[in-house]
Amino acid sequence: EWALQAGVRWDRFRSERRGSSFDAACRFDNVFVPGLGTFPVQVCDPPAYALTEAAEPRRWANRASELGLSWQATPALQAFVSRTRTFRAPNLDELTRASAGLRPQTGLTHEWGVRHRPSDALAWSATFFDIRNRDEITFGYDALSNQELNRNLAQPTHRRGVELGLSWRAVPSVQLQAQVTHLRARLGDRGFEVPLVARNTASLAVQWQIGEGWRGTLA
């Protein structure tokens, strides 16, 4: 049995940034108190409001799409493949300290793998993935402004790896979930390693159905 999944999404994004300040000039005046002498007293003018920045609004139009195909080889075994085009617009925190040319990042992801459920209590999966991003958003030194800002990487990034998943229901109320991922992340055409990206990660979680409507998780 074959199944085809497809989807598309259009997104329009607009952001506007304004800055303002309240300034108050202060000085110290000497005040003479009979019998005690002269003392410095701070005197401040009424605060003044000023619009310090009104950046041009930023407008972006993006499209995301997904195309997937799966084959149910047997009731317990399924093979799948997918192609996904993604984007990510800068969030509010990133726009607060953003370079002048900050824009959404775009990506293309390919996945293929198998899912197998040999019994009602046991299931496992293996997924191979290939992710290519352009204009990836990162926080770092911006040469144009000579500041640390959120900016787009000048070179594309490439992530490739495999993810193994296991789910086992030991008893009807307790389920064990494990996941292991091996990843190679590279920057640019020369294949430099992306810093601070772990090659191997693993996770383990235990879910316990305490009662009707209640569930506990230890991860």
Image (cartoon, rainbow, N blue to C red):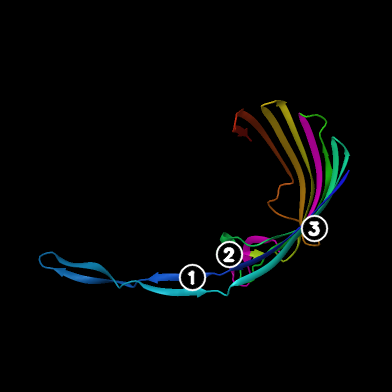
Q: Residues within 10 Å of mark 3 (few under 14, many from 20)?
A: few
- Earlier residue among tags 3 and 1: 1
* Three-letter amino acid code at the position of disc 1: Gly
Q: In this figure, which residue is indicated by the disc labeled 1?
A: 19
Residue at figure coordinates x 66%, y 27% from the top left: 173
Residue 135 drawn in magenta:
yes
Q: Position of residue 8 (x, y in %)?
A: 75, 59
Q: Which residue is mark 3?
A: 191
Q: CA distance from mark 1 to mark 2?
A: 13 Å
Element carrying mark 1: strand
Q: Which residue is mark 2?
A: 95
Q: Where residue 207 sits in the image (x, y, percent)?
A: 65, 32
Q: Quadrant of the C terminus?
A: top right
Residue 134 is situated, as x and y percent measured from the top left of the image, at 74, 63
Task: Please state if 125 lies on the left or on the right of 18 as rendered.
Answer: right
Q: Which residue type does callout 2 highlight?
A: Leu
- Residue at left offset 64%, top offset 65%: 151
| Of the image marks 1 and 2, the number of the one nearer the N terminus | 1
Question: Secondary structure under badge 2?
Answer: helix
Q: Is residue 34 visible?
A: yes
Left/right of residue 38 with respect to residue 208 in the rendered view: left
Which of the two marks, 3 or 1, is nearer to us in this view? 1
Question: Along the polypeptide, which appears first: circle 3 or circle 2?
Answer: 2
**Residues shaded magenta:** 121-150
How far apart marks 3 and 1 lie (CA) works out to 40 Å
Q: Amino acid at mark 3?
A: Gly
Q: Give the residue at x 73% y 63%.
A: 63
Would you say the magenta stretch is mainly helix, strand or loop? Answer: strand
